[in-house]
Image: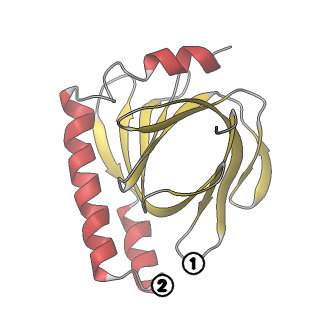
């Protein structure tokens, strides 16, 4: 039986630290594993110690090339999806490689946008992203650009039940 705590470890493709934090496991369903992070959680962000100021919920899909962060106000991004390699689990630790591209839905306007294409292109050259990885990353971003805009789950209402569990 898995524990209630999951360690979430994001690295970049070259293995450098990106994010690292503990999260509370809420559920596992057909989409993936739902975890939550409360305000005050100690974390590492870009290799530096940090403390989460705004709680969030993270969906770690079983086999997809993305993770989804669901945010309460006052964050301006309601949904923030990182394009990643599929999650790799080692016990209660999940390892995820962040591939730079992000798909974001803005809270105030509902605008869905692709971000950090320049960083993706830079790291593609610097880290030598293989062609199949580039194809998978772009395909995931294309799917998310549609799903975040058309009311598909889990991006419509499904996450609200978990977000209530981390809210102050």
Which element is circle 1 on?
Answer: loop
Q: Nearer the viewer, residue 156 or 120?
A: 156
Q: Position of residue 89 (x, y in %)?
A: 57, 56
Q: Position of residue 45 (x, y in %)?
A: 69, 53
User: Is residue 124 in sight in this rendering?
Assistant: yes
Q: Are marks 1 and 2 in contact (CB under 8 Å)?
A: yes
Q: Position of residue 26 (x, y in %)?
A: 57, 27
Q: Position of residue 125 (x, y in %)?
A: 41, 84
Say how many tags the image has: 2
Which element is circle 2 on?
Answer: helix
1 or 2: tag closer to the N-terminus: 1
Closer to the camera: disc 1 or disc 2?
1
Could you say which quadrant of the image residue 90 lies in?
bottom right
Q: Residue at x 48, y 56 (%)?
A: 87
Viewed as shown, does residue 92 lie left or right of 123? right
Q: Eyeballing the image, is 162 above or below 13?
A: above
Per the rendering, the mark at residue 90 is: none
Q: Residue at x 33, y 73 (%)?
A: 133
Viewed as shown, does residue 159 lie left or right of 16? left
Name the image quarter holding the C terminus.
top right
Q: CA distance from mark 1 to mark 2?
A: 9 Å
User: Is residue 73 in sight in this rendering?
Assistant: no
- List the residue tagged with mark 2: 126
Mark 2 burial class by Cα count in 10 Å: few <14, some 14-19, many 20+: few
Per the rendering, the mark at residue 14 is: 1
Q: Nearer the viewer, residue 142 or 120?
A: 142
Q: Eyeballing the image, is 4 above or below 116?
A: above
Mark 1 burial class by Cα count in 10 Å: few <14, some 14-19, many 20+: few
Name the image quarter holding the N terminus.
top right
Q: Residue at x 30, y 72 (%)?
A: 134
Tell me, what colour scheme is on the image?
secondary structure
Q: Residue at x 31, y 23 (%)?
A: 156
């Amino acid at each position: 039986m898995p524990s209630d705590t999951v360690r979430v470890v994001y690295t970049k493709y070259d293995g450098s630290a990106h994010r690292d934090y503990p999260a509370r496991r809420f559920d596992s369903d057909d989409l993936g594993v739902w975890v939550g992070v409360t305000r005050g959680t100690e974390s590492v962000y870009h290799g530096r110690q940090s403390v989460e100021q705004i709680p969030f919920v993270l969906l770690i899909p079983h086999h997809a090339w993305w993770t989804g962060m669901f945010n309460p106000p006052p964050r301006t991004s309601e949904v923030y999806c990182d394009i990643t390699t599929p999650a790799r689990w080692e016990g209660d630790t999940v390892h995820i490689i962040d591939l730079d591209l992000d798909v974001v839905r803005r809270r105030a306007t509902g605008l869905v946008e692709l971000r950090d294409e320049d960083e993706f292109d830079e790291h593609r050259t610097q880290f030598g992203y293989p062609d199949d990885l580039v194809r998978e990353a772009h395909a995931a971003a294309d799917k998310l650009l549609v799903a975040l805009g058309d009311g598909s789950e889990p991006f419509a209402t499904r996450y609200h039940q978990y977000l209530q569990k981390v809210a102050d």
